[in-house]
Image (cartoon, helix red, strand yellow):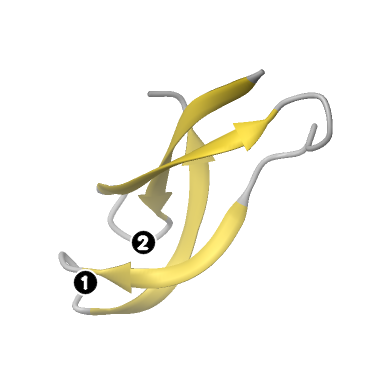
Amino acid sequence: MRDLVGLACDRCKRKNYTTTKNKKRTTDKLEFKKFCAGCRTHTAHKEIRV
């Protein structure tokens, strides 16, 4: 039911985080504001395939 997805930084495109999401309830792509170690700042992280 829950699928593993990765979160990549918008600025540097580095994959920093992984999380799970329910594909039936959440059909659109996830987006969170999280800390990126590459940019050393808080940036938007969007869902990518793992």
Residue 22, image x, y percentages: 69, 31
Q: Which residue position is annotated with label 2?
A: 11
Whether 22 is drawn above or below 41: the answer is above
Whether 13 is drawn above or below 27: the answer is below
Q: Which image quarter holds the C terminus?
A: top left
* Amino acid tagged 2: Arg
Left or right? Give the position of 6 relative to 46. left
Mark positioned earlier in the residue sequence (1 or 2): 2
What residue appears at the point 25 percent right and 48 percent down from the top-left corner? Answer: 14
Label 2 secondary element: loop
Question: Could you give the CA–CA distance between mark 1 and mark 2, rounded to whole angstroms?
Answer: 8 Å
Determine whether label 1 and label 2 are within 8 Å by CB: yes
25 vs 12, nearest the viewer: 25
* Amino acid tagged 1: Cys
- The disc label shown at residue 39, or none: 1
Q: Residues within 10 Å of mark 2 (few under 14, many from 20)?
A: few
What residue appears at the point 55 percent right and 23 percent down from the top-left corner? Answer: 3
Left or right? Give the position of 28 relative to 16. right
